[in-house]
Amino acid sequence: MKNIRLILTACALAGVLTACQSVPTTPIAQTTALPNAPIKFATTGKIGITAKTTDGTQGGSAFYAWAQDGERFSIDLTGALGIGATQIRYNGTTATLESERTGLIEADSPEELLLSATGWYAPISQLPYWIVGRNAPSDDNKTLDANGRLTTASNTGWTANFEYDKHQRPSRLRITHQDGHRVVMTITHQ
């Protein structure tokens, strides 16, 4: 159960964390008009994780607030399986995770932080792209709908499925790994 708590915390990392306290939002038109522009957004939502472990399947969920500015990000989690408030930050050179239960954990990258905290690899660097409905540069495969919106993207054994309401940006991501791990994110763009 401890690993699931840390996985949930670190998975909300999802991206490339920032030391920023607040990040202005990016209008939808800017993201779609400039597909190679740096990623900048603010979102809130809920993240749920189901993980296969040696003890069977474990899962949990948390509410998150995520601010992204280029490669820097800041994620605040609440309700993460009773581990209290958790902050995840990346300033371009150092990734940190801090909660009452874990204290401070540092690493050189978000991927190293997740691996150190949980022993688990996830497509962290792809998440900021996926959250705004863009395929990541390292994605293996992608499909688009009739409106030109990304519907699936694949990366190192992970497949992301995108759901949209009436906007160009996704409102939900369903991300699965071939080994059975699953992440579901609801996304409210600010």
Image (cartoon, helix red, strand yellow):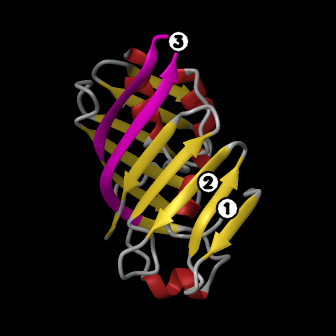
Q: Amino acid at mark 1?
A: Ala
Residue 58 painted magenta: yes
Residue 115 painted magenta: no
Q: Which residue carries the number 3 mark? A: 54
Q: Residues within 10 Å of mark 1 (few under 14, many from 20)?
A: some
Vertical order, 91 against 141 (above or below): above
The image position of residue 101, as x and y in percent, is 30, 18
The quarter holding residue 110 reads: top right
**Sequence-first tag of 2 and 3:** 3
**Sequence-first tag of 1 and 3:** 3
Highlighted magenta segment, given as a residue range: 42-63
Q: Amino acid at mark 2?
A: Gln
State whether the magenta stretch is mostly helix, strand or loop.
strand
Q: Which residue carries the number 1 mark? A: 136
Secondary structure under tag 1 reads: loop
- Report how far apart the C-alphas of labels 2 and 3 lie in the structure: 27 Å
The quarter of the rendered structure image containing the N terminus is top left
Secondary structure under tag 2 reads: helix
The image position of residue 138, as x and y in percent, is 75, 56
Q: Residue at x 64, y 60 (%)?
A: 153
Q: Which residue carries the number 2 mark? A: 126
Q: Residue at x 37, y 19 (%)?
A: 102
Contact check, label 1 and label 2, Cβ < 8 Å? yes
Q: Residue at x 55, y 50 (%)?
A: 16
Contact check, label 2 and label 3, Cβ < 8 Å? no
